[in-house]
Image: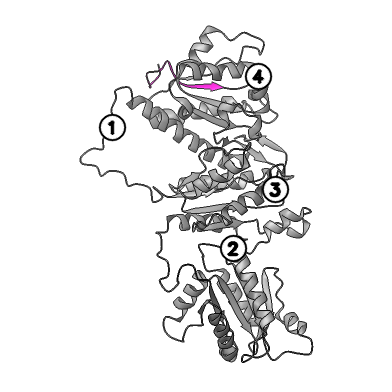
Amino acid sequence: MAATGSRHDVFISYAHSDDLPVAGTERGFVTQLVADLKTEVSRKVCNDIDIWWDHFRLTGGTRVTAEIMAAAGDCACIIVIASPAYLRSEWCGRERDAFYQNGANGQSGIFLVGMEPIDQGRLPVTLRDLNAYVFYRTLDDGRATRPLRTEFQQDKEPYYNRLSLLVQHVSDHLGKSLNGRGKSAPHPSPKEPRAKEPDGAGRSVLLLDVTDDLLERRAQLKDYLEQEGITVLPGRRYSRDDMDLHRTQIIEDLGRSHACVQIVGGLTGDRSDHPRGMAWLRCETIRTSGSAVPFLQWRDPDLDVNAITDADARELTVQPSVRTDRFPDFRRAVAELALKPPERADPRLQQGVLSVFVNSDLLDRDLGTGVAQWLEAHGFMVLEPPQATQDAREDWEASVKYCDSHLLVYGQTKPAWVRTQILLSNKVQREAPLDLLGVAVGPPLPAQSRDKLDALALRYPGIHYLQVEDHQQLNPAEMERFVSRLREAHAHV
């Protein structure tokens, strides 16, 4: 007997061939999933739920009987096991139609389980806006996949993590169906305190879609955040027929998020809608949105970027905003950022005026002052190094955090000072990527100024170098070139 008042609580729609056991397994994928689902959902809903799925003995050519039509149409929710075989099945399509025609749950009563990655355009129109629960593993070549099997040790953790999410959402839906039929939700006992709301309640993270080789990493991060009580967006599939709508949907979800995350790797992805690939489209959409929501990018530190053959994919992985810390550290950082209370903007920074932090060591303070005065005279807000006080570290971090450009003066100071400043500033969490990182190379200059850059031993394409020979008479062409680069960079952030 169903717990919800419908004839059945859950209807499983799947292709027969997807439940055939493979070598090394005793049960088919669907059999395993349904058994686990029944146990866990019954435990959460506190009822022995009714799952209708036992039509595997029927062949694909058998007519859809009245019994099956009635079962599909009179159930509280339907779980679709999506696969290439499922898409080829006319039978499965009729099951969905019966649910839509007779069910009253709409989209909220449909749950999509992915056994294999399927292009959104191949899905039935009624399923395209749903996010799938990913129950497959991407293999080492980044292309081949296989369903998760609990018999394999390496699959157990991702399988049960995905199962927990599916169980929770199905249980939530069945609970609403139960209460909606005249049964009130249980109230906590007066002697028992009400359960504490999760720390992440009301917080959300926009986790951008990824190429096929990164699906497992994205799923791991999604699982981790949701276990912290953080809502992961998008809760729908974005349009692939209209790229303007696709961008609009991203920006809409960005406005509801407390952080945005993109995982990048060695594949560029589909180029049919963007000349550099969908990863670049998503990145550019976020960067040009004008949003102050923190944007975090990450790639695997073990990825050999020099071995990436696609120039666009390689360039995206070496952006200055891309982090390369270990994945457990990164996912903790994302959660901490999402849970962090909003900060007020530094009142010292005037909106609409570009700010430059002219950072110099004591040996080059005169040169730094000359650069600062030139920039101030040309309409920039200039932040100079803090005084040696108890609050110096806090002042320095505020300057790095809120400036539009960080300009390091490299004259008499040692190369190690410049490298240390860059490494330290890279650790400061910013709400938006730095518009421009610059190094002003000043006296004493050797016969060949390149020798001084070689001594710096710093190889990073995101640095703009400018030569300043005299703090009293700066080179206008060099300064104008830096200012043009800064204004151009700011226009795209």
Q: In the figure, residue 81 lies in which quadrant?
A: top right
Compared with 72, 240 (above or below) is below
Secondary structure of residue under mark 3: loop
Where does label 4 land, which residue?
89
The amino acid type found where label 2 is placed reads Ala
Q: Nearer the viewer, mark 4 or mark 2?
A: 2
CA gap between label 4 and label 2 equals 51 Å
Q: Nearer the viewer, mark 1 or mark 3?
A: 3
Instruction: Please say whether residue 32 is visible from this viewpoint.
Output: no
Q: Is residue 485 left or right of residue 339?
A: right
CA gap between label 4 and label 3 equals 32 Å
The label shown at residue 277 is 3
Compared with 196, 345 (above or below) is below
Q: Nearer the viewer, mark 1 or mark 2?
A: 2
Compared with 96, 134 (above or below) is below
Q: Mark 2 and mark 1 in contact (Cβ < 8 Å)?
A: no
The label shown at residue 186 is 1
User: Mark 3 or mark 2, which has the lower sequence index?
Assistant: 3
| Residue 126: percent from left, percent from top | 56, 27
Where does label 2 land, which residue?
491
Q: Nearer the viewer, mark 4 or mark 1?
A: 4
The amino acid type found where label 1 is placed reads Pro
The amino acid type found where label 4 is placed reads Ser
Which residue shows up at 41% across the image and 83% down it?
390
